Amino acid sequence: MAEVSMEEDLPLTVEVIRIAVSQSWEEDRLGNRIPVEVREDVPVLVHSWRIVSSDEPILAGHERLTVDARMITAVGEFSPTDKVELPGIVDQAGDPVTFEVIGRAVNVDHNPWLHVGREIVNLKEMSG
């Protein structure tokens, strides 16, 4: 049986901001090395995203975290250490709301019938 690709049916047309945070080192005024977080904002195209209804929450991971939003993305585009800003989602002050990726993405490509080339990324809203 030939593998069917559906990547064309799920095009990547919606832009979100992937926030990759890494750690670097700087010297303070006394010459001591101190850790510093380095934030890199990268625009990424995804297929879609949605805020999850609180009426029927989705739970993810061993800690049973409540999922606040989900995205359909290209395989391997996001890692569990990434953070995300979704277009148009702002707090009461008008600042973008930041979400963190919860665990690994859900990939359904490893089956004998269908290859979609996409995966579901679960997001949790960060507070403060």
Image (cartoon, helix red, strand yellow):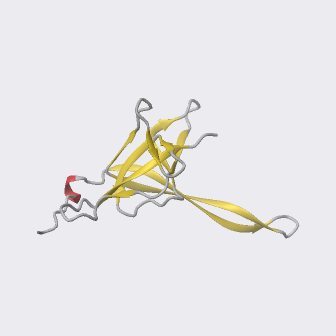
Q: Quadrant of residue 53?
A: top left
Identified at 23% across, 59% down, the residue is 7
* Image coords of residue 27 (percent x, y): 79, 68
Toward the viewer: 77 or 102? 102
Q: Quadrant of residue 105?
A: bottom left
Q: How many marks?
A: 0
- Identify whether 69 is placed above or below 41: above
Toward the viewer: 56 or 68? 56
Identified at 52% across, 57% down, the residue is 82
Q: Residue furthest right?
A: 30
Q: Is residue 105 left or right of residue 2?
A: right
Please state, as top left, top right, bottom left or bottom right, where the N terminus lies in the image: bottom left
Q: Residue furthest front?
A: 62
Q: Is residue 84 left or right of residue 6?
A: right
Q: Residue furthest left?
A: 1
Q: Quadrant of residue 92?
A: top right
- Identify whether 13 is placed above or below 34: above
Please state, as top left, top right, bottom left or bottom right, where the C terminus lies in the image: top right
Identified at 40% across, 45% down, the residue is 70
Identified at 51% across, 36% down, the residue is 90
Q: Is residue 98 left or right of residue 30?
A: left
* Image coords of residue 107 (percent x, y): 34, 59
Toward the viewer: 11 or 108? 108
* Image coords of residue 66 (percent x, y): 49, 41
